[in-house]
Amino acid sequence: MPDADAFPAMNPEQDLELLAEAAREAGRLAMSYFGRDPKVWNKENNSPVTEADLAVDHYLASELRGARPGYGWLSEETTDDKTRLSHERLFVVDPIDGTRAFIHGEADWSVSVAVVEAGRPVAAALYVPVAEDLYLATAGSGARLNGTTIAVNGRSQLSGAHVAGPRALRERTALQDAGINQDDPIRSLALRIALVADGRRDAAIATARSHDWDLAAADLLVQEAGGQLTDLDGRALRYNRADVRHPALIATSPSLRDALGEVVRSVLG
């Protein structure tokens, strides 16, 4: 792949226009398979992948890399040859985040695309095709849902908070003991975090071993909406490292982060 310095850099707003259109089109492509019994395979880690995941990945790679040949590339459905590490700027993509929901005809899946620069997302689009919801953000310019500015709700009390987490957490009592409402699980981790950005959830929890592609777009959304996505010690995430996996995470408002972090640490360690 050509060196990134061989091509002029685009500003985040220019990149966002590209991401937004590509995410919409990718969603339309995915919907052409949705509810039609797509072919499914199991990957080496026993997670499913469908023919729709692969078709959307191919479309996004062609559209995004064709428009920005100097950017690196990291996608869940593309073999990672590590050439991205030589790029200051790259696309981070999950063609269908929430593949299990997609397979079962459920609505909680999304298309997640971001541009990462110097280890942090600077432009992000998250499209939820079934609901036709489009989340957009650029660094320093706020976050929007379908054109309307969004913000975290800023709740400061754990008791009564509505938290979205993985199914495994529902078997533990620590959150319930703290008065936290554990809402129905949301299969797409990116969407789970986006619901914090738009104020529909007070917090979201991710267990360890989520990946860059699950998080990059949603990270920017919640940050630009006034929230935080951090590890349990309050550290922000860095992207485009050799290892793209992350520890257990929480997304919430700054006013709720410390108290929630203590409870989640007691469960996840």
Image (cartoon, helix red, strand yellow):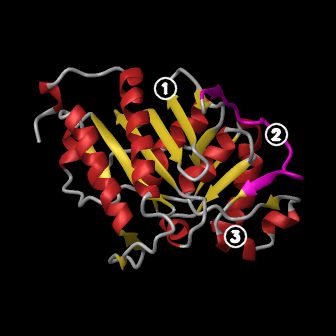
Q: Amino acid at mark 1?
A: Ala
Q: CA distance from mark 1 to mark 2?
A: 23 Å
Q: CA distance from mark 1 to mark 3?
A: 32 Å
Quadrant in which the N terminus is drawn: top left
Task: Identify the mark nearer the N-term, 1 or 2.
Answer: 1
Q: CA distance from mark 3 to mark 2?
A: 21 Å
Q: Is the residue marked by circle 2 packed among few (<14), some (14-19), or many (20+) residues within 10 Å?
A: many
Identify the residue shown where x is 37% and y is 39%: 22
Secondary structure beneath label 1: loop
Give residue 155's mark.
2
Residue 72 seen: no
Give residue 169's mark.
3
Task: Identify the mark nearer the N-term, 1 or 3.
Answer: 1
Q: Which residue is mark 1?
A: 139
Report x, y in % for residue 45. 37, 76
Q: Is residue 44 above or below residue 266?
A: below
